[in-house]
């Protein structure tokens, strides 16, 4: 039976290709919300002992690195520049109370 990657899970192992100190100590793959990610981790030493610092990089379908998806905040209203620093001009404000 072939391994099937489940959503919100991943696999990570020792990086056998590490040749420089800046290369990650561990690497692997993860599937989060249907998006494939490449994982990398560096062993660090802190005041409470050793830990790993992780980096998640999205991959495109061909397996190459892709840019992270951008999230735009919801637009509830827009504001324009005021004539004085204490005056605020509101173009659109949603005054509806949701309850």
Image (tube, grey):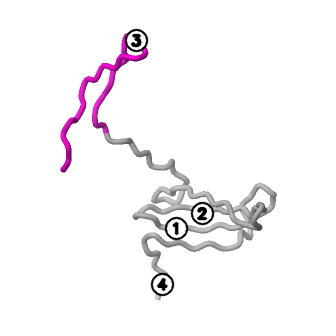
Q: Residues at badges 4 and 3 in contact (C-beta under 8 Å)?
A: no
Mark 3–mark 2 distance (CA, rounded to whole Å): 49 Å
The residue depicted at 36 percent of the width and 16 percent of the height is: 87
Which residue in the protein does label 2 denote?
39
The numbered mark, 1 or 2, whose residue comes first in the sequence reads 1
Mark 1–mark 4 distance (CA, rounded to whole Å): 17 Å
The tag on residue 2 is 4
Which residue in the protein does label 3 denote?
84
Q: Residues at badges 1 and 2 in contact (C-beta under 8 Å)?
A: yes
What segment carries the magenta color?
Answer: 75-99
Which residue in the protein does label 1 denote?
30
Decide if residue 91 is on the left or right side of residue 80: left
The residue depicted at 47 percent of the width and 56 percent of the height is: 60
Residue 97, x across and y down, in percent: 20, 43
Q: Residues at badges 1 and 4 in contact (C-beta under 8 Å)?
A: no
Mark 1–mark 2 distance (CA, rounded to whole Å): 7 Å
Mark 3–mark 1 distance (CA, rounded to whole Å): 51 Å
Front residue of 18/98: it is 98
Disc 4 residue crowd, few under 14, some 14–19, many 20+, Cα 10 Å: few
Q: What secondary structure is marked by label 1? A: strand
Q: What secondary structure is marked by label 2? A: strand
Q: Residues at badges 3 and 1 in contact (C-beta under 8 Å)?
A: no
């Amino acid at each position: 039976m072939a391994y099937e990657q489940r959503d919100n899970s991943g696999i990570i192992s020792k990086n056998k290709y590490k040749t420089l100190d800046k290369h990650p100590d561990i690497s692997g793959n993860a599937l989060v919300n249907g998006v494939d990610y490449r994982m990398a981790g560096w062993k660090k030493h802190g005041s409470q002992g050793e830990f790993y610092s992780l980096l998640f990089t999205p991959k495109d379908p061909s397996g190459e690195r892709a840019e992270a998806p951008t999230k735009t905040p919801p637009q509830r209203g827009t504001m324009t520049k005021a004539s004085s620093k204490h005056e605020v001009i509101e173009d659109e404000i949603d005054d509806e109370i949701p309850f």
